[in-house]
Image: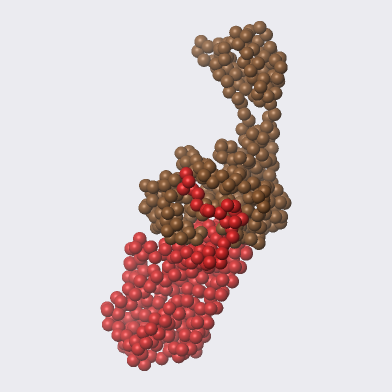
Chain colours: A brown, B red
Amino acid sequence: MPDEPAIHARALTRVYKAKPDAVTALGGVDLDVQAGEYFGLLGPNGAGKTTLIKIFTTLLLPTSGKASVAGFDVVTETAKIRRVINMVSGGEQSGYGLLTAREQLWMFSQFYGLSNRDGWRRVDELIEVTGLTEQRDQKVRTLSTGQRQKLNFARGMLNDPWVLFLDEPTLGLDVAAARDLRDHTLSWKAAAPARTVLLTTHYMVEAEQLCDRIAIVDRGKILALGTPEELRRRVQAESIFRIELDRLPQNGGIAAIGALPGVLSAVRADDEVADEAGSDRVALKVALADDSALTSVVTAVAERGSNLVGLAKSEPSLEDVFVELVGRGFGDEDKSPPEPAS
Amino acid sequence: MTAYRAAPATNAREAAEWSTGRVLRTNLRAIVGRAYPRVIGLTREPSWIFFEILLPFLAVSAFVFVYRALGAPEQFIGFVVLGGAVTSFWLNVVWMMAAQFYWEKDQGNLELYFTAPMHLMAILAGMAIGGLVMTSSRALAVIGIGSLLYGVSYNVEQPFLLAGVFLLTMVPLYGMGMLFASLFLLWGREANHLAELLQEPIYFLGGVNFPLRAIGPIAGVVVATLPLGVGLDAMRQLAFVESGVQGVLPVGTEILILAVMGVVFLVGARLALGYLEMLARREGRLTLRWQ
């Protein structure tokens, strides 16, 4: 079945028993992630991301609905799923502190059935590519948080999984360590394009940088799904450019720019540039029906005696998309019941 | 970055098809892998010499002096030393088998064990074998030091049978630990409280510091339910033949009881583990640290 999704869910629900009321962590999720995709689940804490990942990794049963990984049912074919997946979670403290980094990876390699020789070889390869060569013989309990998470990532690669689940993998890491880890996941995907990654995160930049497609999740439901570009288009159909000029255009000025074909509007943007000492600079915010109208705008400002100083396309962020869909930002207080900790 | 790539299969469905031999090999390797931290721990944490040999040895010594003060038969000293050695295994079972899953859950290891392709019984077996190796060194140290210090003389006519009884005792003893590993997690209480709750009664009912016959009629019941008691009673009969020591039951009967117990506890552990996994997946108990 070549077109079978790597990850599939239909009408998937999960309700946790709790007092006084049951908590609905997933309220009917439909999802298809194709083989080879780097797919992101983006949502705030309590959105249901971790519950979804735990169902796919066979740690939780759905309350109703269907879910499968690599075509295998998560309820009845758990053994087969476990042979082709792996999982790395943020803040993971797995393993045993008295083992060295190398020994710890070898131990986990045995759980995936690697022979002794293949296990050690794979461990050494992964230690090298994750940049832990200097720490290879260091006890795990002495590793820094970033090093520990690199080790967890190497553990997740031991069986070269067909479907890799990354649950908030950069949680609590500093900028450099998080960037390293993101680079590793991209390198792995590049080396193994048929592999599938399902990433949960509440970092917009991470989702945008890594994912081919993203599902925005909140309160157990998928609110929107598409490529980062498609999602941004949901809240902003036009292209918006910020154009910096050395002086105001003459001969009709900004109004003339706004009247050009393909230009939806042209207004003066906020004006920090004009505050610069001795400067006549001005910034315009120009909305275009599509990017092709930009050429006529640039030509028009030149004809009106202005020189182009700066040009930047203004994109809505995924946070804008989220706010548009949910009516609140990631940082705003979530009134929904908390999702149980992972 | 080709080092990231390892699996030769062409697609996930193909990669998920494992032969019976591969399943078996994976489980055997998982046993070795999980036993490794326990065995290597012997060399990494030398403090165990103080905490697990010298401190328990003080308790053994106290009973030795009590028996000597009371003028008890000299074989009682040997009973206590042997009991002290076997106690190490019980402590290992209750603290590092029964309570282990609870701690593994807190560390996040249990999730990884569940999502890996080996059976969880392999993890339990690895923990048991690693614990057995680790504790054997401690038990031998207690026997060696105790025997030298207090002049214990052994009369062993059937050393292989004695070794066999020892190994047979370990099967139900660690099987009980494997069973409790799941039960502790299911009961959902603090593991150390449950371990403490079990520790002292088993010391008493297992006859660690006195011959089991001294308990009287209850001894029969004890022997029939506790691997520590029945195993120790059989080992004492085999290690002190000339002392005329009488066990609760003949050695042959006790061997039979141990064998039955071994099967019962291992099957019980397997069933409890299956139930734990089902409940864990249904109710989220396995993955929710607050439960």
Q: Which residue lies at the image location 58% right of the left edge and 20% below the top edge?
A: A311
Q: Is residue A65 left or right of residue A38?
A: right
> Where B289 falls versus A311 (above or below)?
below
- Residue A313 horizontal/vertical position (percent): 60, 25
Q: Residue at x 56, y 44 (%)?
A: A193
Quadrant hosting residue A316: top right
Residue B84, given in percent of the width and then of the height, sits at 37, 77
From this viewpoint, is residue A6 visible? Answer: yes
- Vertical position of residue A41 compared to residue B136: above or below: above
Which quadrant of the figure contains the C terminus of chain B? bottom right
Mark yes or no: residue B99 visible.
no
Q: Residue at x 63, y 40 (%)?
A: A213
Which residue sits furthest top? A251
Considering depth in this image, is A260 or A36 the residue closer to the camera? A36
User: Could you tell me which residue is drawn at 42 percent across and 85 percent down?
Assistant: B234
Residue B73, compared with residue A12, is above or below; it is below
